[in-house]
Amino acid sequence: MNIADRYIVLRENAKVIEKEMAALRAEFLASGVELLAADGFDFAMKHQLSDRPTIDKDLLAQFLTAAQIKACTKVTQTSSVTVVQNIRRIAA
């Protein structure tokens, strides 16, 4: 199997794993827990919710002054789930 073939196989495997990870992220988010320590690893899952300002380009095209551009700015919520080092297990 050449490099391209191996790459395609790994990419397809990664798609399956990404779907499984997405399901676990959804389960974690549905639990309402913000930090969940792993039992067998020195890591934890952490959920952070933050606001991120964005510009509405359709409205921006209609306004040119700084005040008008600021009026076009909207805030959207972003959510991320990351795996972070579990300090509690390392200290134990």
Image (cartoon, helix red, strand yellow):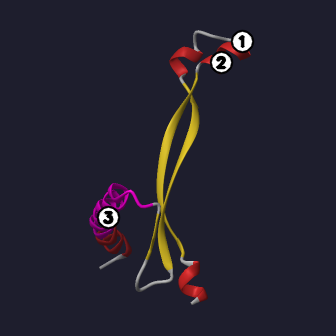
Residue 70 against residue 83 in the figure, above or below: above
Query: Which kind of residue does numbered mark 1 sit on?
Result: Thr
Q: Amino acid at mark 2?
A: Ile
On the rendered image, what quadrant is the C terminus found in?
bottom right
Q: CA distance from mark 3 to mark 1?
A: 46 Å
Q: Which mark is residue 7?
A: none
Mark 3 residue crowding within 10 angstroms, few (<14) / some (14–19) / many (20+) = few
34, 26: nearer the viewer: 34
* In this picture, residue 50 sits left or right of residue 39: right
* Residue lying at 38% horizontally and 56% vertically, measured from the top left: 32
Of the numbered discs in the image, which one, if any, rests on residue 69? 2
- Please give the range of residues in magenta: 12-33
On screen, residue 63 above or below 84: above
Q: CA distance from mark 1 to mark 2?
A: 6 Å
* Callout 1 touching callout 2 (CB < 8 Å): yes
Residue 26 x/y as whole percent: 32, 57
Residue type for callout 3:
Leu
Label 1 sits on a secondary structure element that is loop
Q: Nearer the viewer, mark 3 or mark 1?
A: 3
Left or right of 3 on screen, residue 87: right
Circle 1 is placed at which residue position? 65
Q: Secondary structure at mark 2?
A: helix
Q: Kindly state the secondary structure of the residue where label 3 is placed.
A: helix
Magenta highlight: main SS: helix
Mark nearer the viewer, 2 or 3: 3
